[in-house]
Image (cartoon, helix red, strand yellow):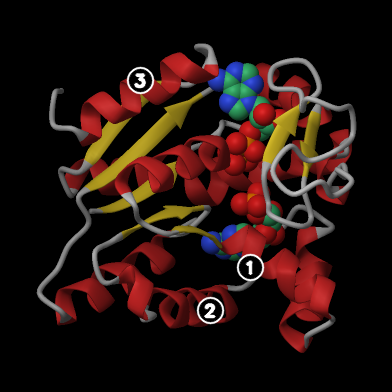
């Protein structure tokens, strides 16, 4: 199963992608997590990406596409994957489509999690992320058992630098300008499925699983 997650920053792509990966035994691939891991390790890729990420801009397509194609060529992607945060531009979508076509494959679903902009800013200000295992929490909607500590790996949770209100506003603008056109793109490809992302997390999950199980 090959699935991509669409939606504004903070719509819940990462939260739901982790649950999809667990249920269907496929890797969860987040380009944002790959960039942040590189930054933590001090690689050149990480340094180059940081300049864009800190401003809420997109990392250029050539860099992003290279890391994504490298990642999906790994053995664990043989039976599929869930992509979270990729593609974010039409050229990225075209590269993915061509890479799949070369192998006689195509995407199964583009799950579009719909959340209005005003709800996004509240969500982002309460997001806490684990730099160790990439688990995502929210101080109100999905708090960890012990405040500030990851339930999964015990690391101290952090607030992402790009979750500050001003950067979030720019990320939303970038989303509407460059990423939202993918909704139409995947609708034409006949793989788009819209999900109401304002529901409680478990209800969003249920709606997505119903789609992936072929119930809807
Ligand atoms: P994205 O990967 O799309 O940027 P996340 O999955 O990181 O979004 O979610 C953003 C924030 O919103 C996180 O703090 C997460 O815990 C919270 N969140 C995710 N889904 C919901 C939901 N359905 N209701 C309320 N909060 C949510
Ligand atoms: P995310 O973790 O998905 O919210 O991504 C965080 C940041 O990483 C984004 O704001 C971009 O700067 C960068 N990024 C992640 N994925 C992509 C992508 N597919 N294309 C360009 N930039 C990306």
The picture places residue 189, in percent across and down from the top left corner, at 18, 49
Residue receiving disc 2: 67
Q: Which residue is mark 1?
A: 34
Q: Is residue 78 left or right of residue 4?
A: left
Residue 110 pos. (x, y %): 31, 44
**Residue 21 locus on image (x, y percent):** 41, 48
Q: Earlier in the sequence, mark 2 or mark 3?
A: 2
- Residue 58 seen in the figure: no
Residue depicted at x 37% and y 50%: 4
The reply to whether the C-beta atoms of the residues labelled 2 and 1 are less than 8 Å apart is yes
Q: Name the residue that disc number 3 marks.
A: 206
> Where in the image, quadrant-wise, is ligand 1 located?
top right
Residue 114 can be seen in this image: yes
Q: Position of residue 80 (x, y in %)?
A: 28, 61
Q: Secondary structure at mark 1?
A: helix
Distance from Cα at disc 2 to Cα at disc 1: 8 Å
The crowd level at tag 3 (other Cα within 10 Å; few <14, some 14-19, many 20+) is few
Residue at point 76% right, 23% down?
A: 143
């Amino acid at each position: 199963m090959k699935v991509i997650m669409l939606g504004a920053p903070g719509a819940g792509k990462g939260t739901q992608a982790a649950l999809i990966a667990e249920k269907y035994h496929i890797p969860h691939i987040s380009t944002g997590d790959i960039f942040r891991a590189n930054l933590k390790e001090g690689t050149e890729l990480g340094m180059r990406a940081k300049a864009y990420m800190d401003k809420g801009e997109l990392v250029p397509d050539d860099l992003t596409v290279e890391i994504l194609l490298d990642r999906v060529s790994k053995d664990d992607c043989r039976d599929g994957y869930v992509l979270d945060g990729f593609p974010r531009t039409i050229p990225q979508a075209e590269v993915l489509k061509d890479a799949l076509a070369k192998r006689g494959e195509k995407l199964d679903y583009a799950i579009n999690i719909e959340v209005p902009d005003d709800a996004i800013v509240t969500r982002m200000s309460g997001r806490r992320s684990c730099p160790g295992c990439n688990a995502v929490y929210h101080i109100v909607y999905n708090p960890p058992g012990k405040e500030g500590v990851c339930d999964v790996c015990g690391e101290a949770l952090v607030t992402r630098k790009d979750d500050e209100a001003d950067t979030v506003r720019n990320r939303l603008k970038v989303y509407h300008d460059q990423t939202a056109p993918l909704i139409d793109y995947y609708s034409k490809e006949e793989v788009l499925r819209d999900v109401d992302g304002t529901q409680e997390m478990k209800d969003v999950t249920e709606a997505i699983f119903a789609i992936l199980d072929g119930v809807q």
